[in-house]
Image: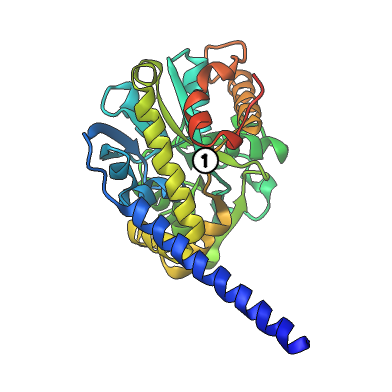
Amino acid sequence: MKIKLEKSTITVIVIIVVVTLILSSFFYLNVTKLYDGPMESITVAYSPFESVTLFWVAEEQNFFRQNGLNVTSRIYDTGAGALNGVLNGEADIAVGTNEFPLTVRALNKERIRTIGSISKSEFIYLVGRADHGIENESDLSGKIIGTTFGTIAHFYLGRFLVLNGIEIQDVTLVDLKTPTDWVGAVVNGSIDAVATAQPYSDFAKEGLGANAVVWSIQSDQALYTQAISTDEWIAGHPELCRKFLKSLYQAEAFVVNHLVEAKAIVKSQMNFSDTYVETVWRQNQFSLSLDQSLVLAMEGEARWLISNNLTNATAVPNFINYIYLDGLKMVKPESVNIIH
């Protein structure tokens, strides 16, 4: 009786495996089949950070083309720069822009909205020079610190200083515009420390070697990488928004089901080492969502900007007016968890 039970169990397992392989093969053939209908063109602005993994995967796996989209990419140094590209008419959608530039533009009453978060990440660091008298957080007072103004690194730096008893006015801030500056300025000693994102904070750490002092400055608050467009473009192209989000959703499924291949895509795009690619997966959650926590983060960032006189606005806006819910509701309804 025992032998029969074991054989029966083995038979069931074999059937499950075979069915799974058949379904997986069907899914693979279906999602990789190129779209043969009319193509529509969109231009996407992005900054090449690891948080745009879903976009890279969607490009590499032809998910955009499968959904009838001919995507042209424009690359910018920062997410804020990519968003400026959209506002200047250089692109239709910005990806890789986190919620902070969206918050800044909302305070300026720009007519823009996010159509979805594509990752949640913790990869902003402060890298200082020990030989410039930096050992503890309190040593940052009076120092020259570089960051990129108007980015989330600027916000996290300001909050990190306050949490350690230092007002942002107690340091000298330097606006660094390019990846070369983010790394080079602290490595060559023209500034005392830099607040920036991975992988550039890692490059700065490597350049300084044993002289580097490093802190994570997000205080366990994730940043939310967005896909953002203008109100006018979204209103005129709801179907393109849906197709774009569907492509990213397929990329999300690919990342889950083909992890090795997804990591290889990111490694190729950024020329990362295998070791750092593993770090990427520890620092990021690659998933489409629109969460209430996004709204709360933007409200906190708006209050910080107002209290530090970094905006002419005096009141926190209703950020629901800067979020387009309908597209993601059609593609992945369970991921929309915003009270409105």
Residue 206, visible in the rendered structure: no
Residue 6 vs residue 40, the one in the foreground: 6
Q: Residue at x 42, y 39 (%)?
A: 246
Residue 89 vs residue 146, the one in the foreground: 89
Q: Residue at x 39, y 21 (%)?
A: 234
Q: Quadrant of residue 163?
A: top right
Placement of 242 over or under 232, stated as above or below: below
* Count of picture labels: 1
Q: Residue at x 21, y 34 (%)?
A: 38
Residue 224 vs residue 258, the one in the foreground: 258
Q: Quadrant of residue 298?
A: top right
Q: Which residue is mark 1?
A: 288
Placement of 204 over or under 120, stated as above or below: below
Residue 286, visible in the rendered structure: yes
Placement of 57 over or under 86, stated as above or below: below
Location of residue 49 in the rendering, given as x and y in whole percent from the top left corner: 42, 48
Residue 284 vs residue 195, the one in the foreground: 284
Q: Relative to residue 140, is residue 173 drawn left or right?
A: left
Mark 1 neighbour class, 10 Å CA radius: few under 14, some 14 to 19, many 20 or more:
many
Dividing the image into 4 quarters, which one contains the C terminus? top right
Q: Residue at x 71, y 41 (%)?
A: 164
